[in-house]
Image (cartoon, rainbow, N blue to C red):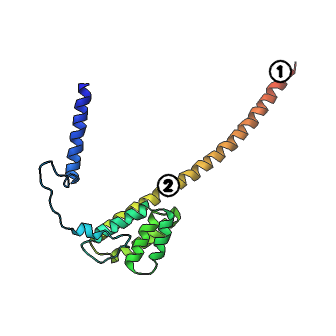
Amino acid sequence: MKGQRLLMRLAAGVLLSTLSACGALTNITMPGSEPEVVSPSVRESCYGAGDLPDFTGEDCLLDEWVAFALQAQRGNSGWRESTLLQLEGNRHDRRLARAIVLSWGDESDWELASDLYKADLPTAPSRLQPLLRQWLNGLEERRGLIAERDKNDGARRKLSAENAQLTKKLEALTAIEESINSRRQSTP
């Protein structure tokens, strides 16, 4: 019983220190302390309702693109289709946003997403480029894993077919051996 209490206190301490280190406890006020009056910050004004990201607004640039990428990751195919329609055109910011949407869609769209990233990443603001490069690297890693999976599946199918052929040959050889053995037993 004492061991469980100690373990619970230790776990609570680790959780509180982790949350504190992450900044998650900064908005919590202790009883008896006055809550801070906070004016709307840049961070709060950055989140538009369903806005498409662009290269304008230096203060909101990263927040805007991260929020959009999260929408793309969590969105369903209907959301992706309607968003892709809104992102038509040749503007670099639209093409990069299209790359983000495509990179979270079907595997068949990943090559196009990669090409869009590679073509338009240099045109992005320098503050945004490392984030976009990280997303491109993640996409390339997923593409590599899928290619490896497909290669392994092909090898597995080939080995399975070879195994089936060898099984048939073994069965034929076993039948021949049984036939020879039965002839030997039947001859005096």
Left or right of residue 70: residue 35: left
Residue depicted at x 21% and y 45%: 16
Query: Residue 96 sits in which quadrant?
Result: bottom left
Q: Earlier in the sequence, mark 1 or mark 2?
A: 2
Residue 122 against residue 164 in the figure, above or below: below
Q: Residue furthest left?
A: 33
* Front residue of this view, candidates 142 and 171: 142
Residue depicted at x 46% and y 60%: 143
Q: Which residue is mark 2?
A: 148
Residue depicted at x 76% and y 37%: 172
| Kind of residue indicated by mark 1 | Gln
Q: Which one is closest to the eye, mark 1 or mark 2?
A: 2
- Please report contact status of discs 1 and 2: CB closer than 8 Å, yes or no: no
How much space separates mark 1 and mark 2, taking CA atoms?
54 Å
| Kind of residue indicated by mark 2 | Glu
**Residue 148 locus on image (x, y percent):** 50, 55
Q: Which residue is mark 1?
A: 185
**Residue 170 locus on image (x, y percent):** 71, 37
Secondary structure of the residue carrying tag 1 is helix
